[in-house]
Image (cartoon, rainbow, N blue to C red):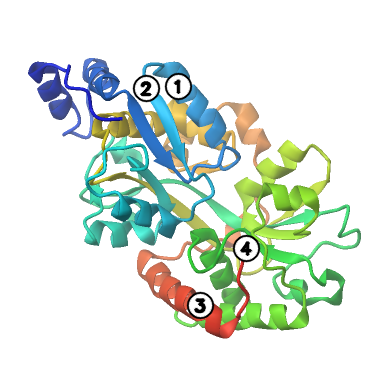
Amino acid sequence: MSIKKTLSASVSMLALLAVSAPAFAQADLDALYEAAKAEGQLTVIALPHSWCNYGGVIESFKAKYPDITINELNPDAGSADELEAVRANIGNTGPQAPDVLDIGLAFGPQAKDEGLLQAYKVSTWDEIPDDAKDADGFWYGDYYGVLAFGINKDIITGENPASWADLMKDDYANSVALAGDPRTANNAILSVYAAGLSSGADAATGAQAGLEFFKALNDKGNFVPVDAEAAAIAQGTTPIAINWDYNLLAARDNLNGNPPIEVVVPSDGVVAGVYVQAISAHAPHPNAAKLWMEYLYSDEGQLGWLEGYCHPIRFNAMAEAGVIPQDLMDKLPPAENYAKAIFPTIEEQNANKTIITTGWDTTVGASVQ
């Protein structure tokens, strides 16, 4: 959809002023909405409805801003696919050009350096931790979780794996799968890295150790080269799915016991991952993109993610302010192994991403479909 030309110059200027500062008043937000209404559409990408309660978040945004149509591209795309969609649609104002991105932390600096992003600081900017955002506003953390095992108890009837090493047991033949392709998907890349850390490797050697772990898992016959999304879990194709805790908990709830799913945070190699939001430098609907960001980082948007078991990036500030309902706090899993979580730095993620994406085929040799 092309940008409509009906917006007056005065409203356009007001919208530009409104989005240039970290904080602005309701009147400025209203002006931003008017500018977004003139564009009429927001194009998102890689937002599965079961991921972090994105289905609920999208519907709540639609209810709040009914004059903006949300165009959803490729819900199951990985972070690398999102960046490629921006590159492939430079100069294209049609429906295939994404306005906003939700990508793994390591992909934020890459996209900035490549000139694929535009800067924008939301009004709650100061409550986003400094180490989870670009100082200039090109990308900013939105939520985080830890990698866990989702176990189909119709198939895995005995003991659950409690550690990464347990996945090598004979009991789990043809059972263990990654959610995503480790050549492109951030959660799969970090899963390989987590497996490496569990073997005693450090940040510098974790990626290669992870590749060796999955080679051994594949050689043993325990690895299933199938993308462990909700459908594969429900069908029993991937009896043990490695994914973010929030995705597995949401799948457990949505499947409602058919099959029964148990979620285990491993006792070792507990890796936390931050995802980040960004606006495409080539967004056909830049004001709608900024309005989307304002919603996501408002209390309402942050609580929407928490309903999907994701820890929103403003969690600490919101908890301190007492704005998180107790029933949402009570839904969070026990904190037993969460305290062991490691948050890889951007530099560590970038280094390990390169090793894993380039070494998967030669070391492991299993093409995830």
- Residue matched to label 2: 68
Tag 2: amino acid:
Ile
Q: Nearer the viewer, mark 1 or mark 4?
A: 4
On-image quarter of the N terminus? top left
Q: Earlier in the sequence, mark 3 or mark 2?
A: 2
- Badge 1 vs badge 2, beta-carbon distance below 8 Å: yes
Q: Earlier in the sequence, mark 4 or mark 2?
A: 2
Tell me which corner region of the image, top left, top right, bottom left or bottom right, holds residue 14. Answer: top left
- Residue matched to label 4: 369
Q: Position of residue 43 (x, y in %)?
A: 38, 36
Q: Nearer the viewer, mark 1 or mark 3?
A: 1
Q: Residue at x 25, y 39 (%)?
A: 121
Depth check, front residue: 187 or 313: 187
Residue 62 badge: 1
- Badge 4 vs badge 3, beta-carbon distance below 8 Å: no
Q: Position of residue 255 (x, y in %)?
A: 76, 39
Q: Earlier in the sequence, mark 1 or mark 3?
A: 1
- Badge 1 vs badge 4, beta-carbon distance below 8 Å: no
Dot 4 crowding, Cα within 10 Å, few <14, some 14–19, many 20+: few
Can residue 32 be seen in this snapshot?
yes
Dot 2 crowding, Cα within 10 Å, few <14, some 14–19, many 20+: some
Secondary element at tag 2: loop
Tag 4: amino acid:
Gln
Q: Residue at x 60, y 83 (%)?
A: 212
Disc 1/disc 2 C-alpha distance (Å): 7 Å
